[in-house]
Image (cartoon, rainbow, N blue to C red):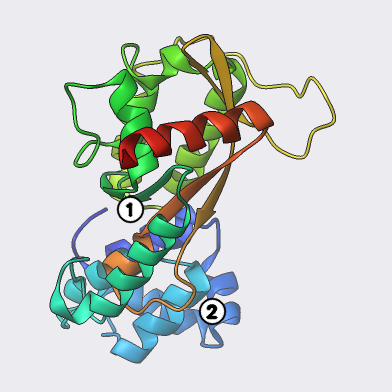
Amino acid sequence: MKNGFGDQLREWRKLRKKSQLELALDAEISSKHISFLETGRANPSKEMIHRLSDVLEIPFRERNLLMLGAGLSPLYSDQKIDDPEMKSVSDAIHFILKQQEPYPAILTNGSWNVLRVNTAARSLFGFFFSDSPVIGQNLMELLFHPDGFRKHIINWDEVCPFLLGRLKQEARLGKRESFELYERISKFLPKDQIEFLPKENLPLVSVDISFEGKVLSFLSVISAFGTPLDVGLQELKIETFFPNNIETAETMAYLASTIKN
């Protein structure tokens, strides 16, 4: 996208497949005003940018770019999880990660970089990548790389399309980092990647991992903060993994006991 507000607005409108008239009706303003905003004949207020951003479902980080493009100060803060102002958020995340023991839990940012993990996740990743700490790495690259975690996922042909679809969806939202990540991930995959077709009438796809002659099967749940007003906070994701069979639950409980001892 170009830097000016009008160019950015036009690109977002096209990305969402809306005409000037459709956007005007949804935002309850005139199509003439939309035209003036896109051509630079009219300057938007913060309130107008906020209204148009809501209609176009623009993420906070990109909304700030719209503000800057219009010569205005960013509307949303972008704080780090360890900043003093984020202590209550940090404490909540710590609680969730700890409560998930003895099952894995991972905190990632909007680019899928790993920020925190609980002890169970650290142990599981450490078993396969003892020389490479998971914190600071990109979770999707770690999963998709030919020498990464995918070699240990038994049902990769089922898991891969879902993960790839998630990245596609994020890229289609217009986030630059998501598009760049999708481009990098795509290079790890064959061009004739087979689309997933459900083999059974199951509610979701598990992640099945080969572990010391056993099959650890996990169900994944992704959580996000419900009322964010910060760029980084909006992008945070906590992925928690739950056992899909007794063997997985027993194995993770055993691993937890060895760490405590």
Can residue 186 be seen here? The reply is no
SS label for mark 2: helix
Residue at the image point whose x is 42% and y is 12% from the top: 151
The extreme front residue here reads 261
Mark carried by residue 110: 1
Label 2, label 1: how far apart the Cα atoms are: 30 Å
Answer above or below: position of 86 versus 103: below
The residue type indicated by label 2 comes to: Ala
Q: Reply above or below: 102 against 134.
A: below
Q: Relative to the observer, which residue lies in front, 88 or 216?
A: 216
Q: Regarding mark 1 in the picture, which secondary structure is present there? A: loop
**Local crowd size for mark 1, using a 10 Å CA cut-off: few (<14), some (14–19), many (≥20):** some
Q: Position of residue 71 (x, y in %)?
A: 14, 79
Res. 202 image quadrant:
top right
Residue 15 in view: yes
**Eyeballing the image, is 6 above or below 149?**
below
Q: Amino acid at mark 1?
A: Gly
Q: Which mark is residue 24?
A: 2
Q: Residue at x 28, y 27 (%)?
A: 126
Where residue 96 sits: x, y (%)? 43, 62
Q: Nearer the viewer, mark 2 or mark 1?
A: 1
